[in-house]
Amino acid sequence: LIHQTSQHKMLALPFRSLVRKVASCGPQWASARCQVAAAALPSARKAGLPAACALSTTSADKPMFDEEVSRIYGVLAQQHKHEHGPWKMMVGAVDEALPKTGGKVLDLASGSGDPGIQIAVELPRSHVTITDASPPQIEAALERSKGVANTTCKVACMADLGEFADESFDVVTSCYGYMFVEDKQKAFDETFRVLKPGGTLVATYWRTLPFIPMVQQVVETVTGAPPPDPPINPLALSAPGLVEGYLEAARLELTRQQDSTYPFEIGSDPDFAYKVGTLTIKAWKDELLAAGDMAGLERARREWW
């Protein structure tokens, strides 16, 4: 749904969250329309960017999460603070899973620091390690977490957590992270590896996003052909049963799942609103720009509006 007023636009977006708890083996979670989920482990058990983190590049020298995309994600991330957004639910799930005497939390794909910073502030008995594959994002997280003593910030890819020991975290969290890494199964496997026996994974993924069909129509109108899957695909985990399959293969047990929908206020600046709405086809727009196809870019903008 898109609600328009004279002041701003708001997108009502659904997600899912998962919570999984490990009693003897491994954790998992997910979120979509948005969905939030928790997973659990069954039986027992300062780094540079690893090459395995294929989410960060489309080629060896072209970052997918460049400065502009990172800025947009930073602004959008603040929307997750909404009453029905994922951060409140995730903090609650972590509070429930974390030992009352305190424990260690690993936040994956944190961007500029959330929800890791919020977890650390609201749960002072936790120590939160904030990670992201993008060095500029971790620099921003370091700046934002100044004064929050129970945090550590590191560049790390969720598909290669080699710098972290086996069974070293009580809880792993990730807000909209697993859909962006290329080797998703490896990311869930690594999550299982670093969770302590009985540990919990709390995560979210998108189930539906109303603007995706809109951008597909934009590309098809301009090119005359259906668009390929976007390199940054927020719906990469939306297919029924897909997340559950990854979790099962990683030996994580899904213990709780919750769907929620909340609005995104994207402001009154039409340029920013257009960039947000067409973020998943940014690579395609960049190709048009590189080819000097200004007419195609203008047509895409008209078609979007």
Image: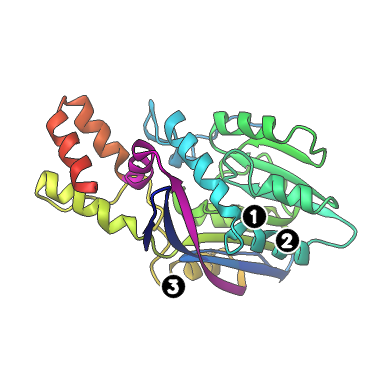
Can you tell which quarter of the image residue 286 is in?
A: top left
What is the x, y in percent for residue 300? 19, 41
Please tell me whether residue 9 belongs to the stretch shown in magenta: no
Cβ atoms at labels 1 and 2 below 8 Å apart: yes
Task: Tell me if residue 151 comes above or below residue 220 in the rendering.
Answer: above
Q: Which label sits in the foreground, 3 or 2?
A: 2
Q: Is residue 169 at all visible to an observer of this figure?
A: yes
**Of callouts 3 and 2, the N-terminal one:** 2
Q: What residue type is labelled 3?
A: Gly
**Of callouts 1 and 2, the N-terminal one:** 2
> Which residue is denoted by mark 3 in the rendering?
241
Q: In which quarter of the image is the N terminus?
A: bottom left
Cβ atoms at labels 1 and 3 below 8 Å apart: no
Which label sits on residue 133? none
Report whether 257 appears left or right of 165: left
Can you tell which quarter of the image residue 256 is in?
A: bottom right
152 or 259, nearer to the observer: 259
Badge 2 element = helix
Q: Give the range drawn in magenta.
A: 255-280
**Of callouts 1 and 3, the N-terminal one:** 1
> Which residue is denoted by mark 1 in the rendering?
173
The residue at the point 22 percent across, 40 percent down is 301
Q: What residue type is labelled 2?
A: Val
> Which residue is denoted by mark 2 in the rendering?
94
